[in-house]
Amino acid sequence: MPVTEDQRRDILKMIEKCGCTKCEKCIDTDFENLAPVKHIPASGLLECYTDRAKGYKFALPFGETHFCRCPVRAYLYNEPGP
């Protein structure tokens, strides 16, 4: 996913605060390897559509699914591309 320099700067600030160990992998792949998500409008949550969510710091298990609480993933979902 292409990002602007301003978006990259915002993301790097978020990464410093959130302490996620997977964020470097996101940056190294230019955010092309992000897990697919579905936005749930009434709740503002992102539902993860991958098995990679299990055991992930920002994955919130809920029944048969997981919600994604990753601030970087939410930011990228809500930001328009360049």
Image: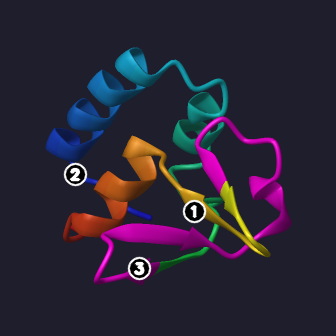
Tell which circle, 1 or 3, labels the residue nearer the N-terminal end: 3
Q: Quadrant of the N terminus?
A: bottom left
How many marks the image carries: the answer is 3
The residue where tag 1 is placed is: 67
In the image, which residues are magenta? 39-60
Q: Nearer the viewer, residue 6 or 63?
A: 63
- Residue found at the far left of this picture: 6
The residue where tag 2 is placed is: 4
The CA span between labels 1 and 2 is: 26 Å
Residue at image point 44% right, 54% down: 73
Q: Quadrant of residue 48?
A: bottom right
Q: Amino acid at mark 1?
A: Phe
72 in the magenta segment: no
- Residue found at the far front of this picture: 63
Residue at image point 30% right, 70% down: 44
Q: Amino acid at mark 2?
A: Thr
Identify the secondary structure beneath mark 2.
Answer: loop
Q: Nearer the viewer, residue 27 or 35?
A: 35
Q: Amino acid at mark 3?
A: His
Identify the secondary structure beneath mark 1.
Answer: strand
The CA span between labels 1 and 3 is: 10 Å
